[in-house]
Image (spheres, rainbow, N blue to C red):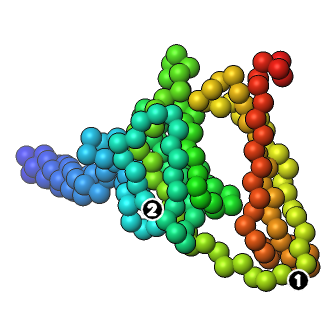
Amino acid sequence: MQSKLRIFASFLLVFSLSLGIFLSLSSKVSATSPNAGDNGQDTCPETGGGWVKMDHLSGTTYDYTAPAGKLVAEVCYKASTQVIYYDVIPPMSPVTVISTVKNQNNKVQDISHASFRLVDVPQYEECSSTIRVSRGWTEWKINPEDESQEFSKMITYIVDSKDNQKQCADPVIQIETRDRALCE
């Protein structure tokens, strides 16, 4: 009888310890992400910590102009249930957010909100002589506002001819568009 009591006591002790560990760990695990809204869905960062959030948006594009002395370095937007982040290289203002989220019928979804991470406008150094450096044209992308059109862009940096890491002026951004029907 005493051995059955010891086995039961041992079982009860192990069970209690296991339950205690489980409960202490489970209280630290959140059911939602750190950027979850009131309804438990993921959202973009709130205003603060370098981010500015614009709520109650509609449409598949949104234009944002940073305040004086600031540039946009990163964008987050939500369309349907998807949260999309991307870097803006180089940082710039204004920026246009274009939704790439599509539903099961292949229709581009509206943007519900967007957040923009801001950085200070760089203070360029004076350069004695400059050269232009470019990474070339981006791949052609379909314009979600008008699927009969596509666009490509090229960013050219103005850098010191002796040190191409030293940026001397704002980059030059060129955008080309074309009619998709003429390219097929």
Residue at 57% in and 64% down:
71
> Is 57 rendered above or below residue 178?
below
Left or right of residue 122: residue 40: left
| 3D distance between C-alphas at marks 1 and 2 | 36 Å
Residue sitting nearer the eye, 132 or 36: 132
Left or right of residue 91: residue 55: left
Foreground: disc 1 or disc 2: 1
Left or right of residue 148: residue 134: right
What kind of element bears circle 2?
strand
Badge 1 density bin: few <14, some 14–19, many ≥20, Cα 10 Å: few
Res 158 → quadrant: bottom right
Q: What residue type is labelled 2?
A: Trp
Q: Do the residues labelled 1 and 2 touch (CB within 8 Å)?
A: no
Residue at 78% in and 75% down:
168
> Is 6 rendered above or below residue 169?
above
Q: Which amino acid does label 1 sit on?
A: Ser
Residue beneath disc 1 = 128
Res 152 → quadrant: top right
Badge 2 density bin: few <14, some 14–19, many ≥20, Cα 10 Å: some
Q: Where is residue 53 in the image (x, y as percent from the top left)?
A: 40, 54
Q: Which mark is residue 2?
A: none
Residue at 87% in and 62% down:
133
For the C terminus, the image quarter is: top right
Residue 32 visible in the picture: no
Q: Where is residue 143 in the image (x, y as percent from the top left)?
A: 65, 31
Residue at 84% in and 54% down:
135
Residue beneath disc 2 = 51
Res 74 → quadrant: bottom right
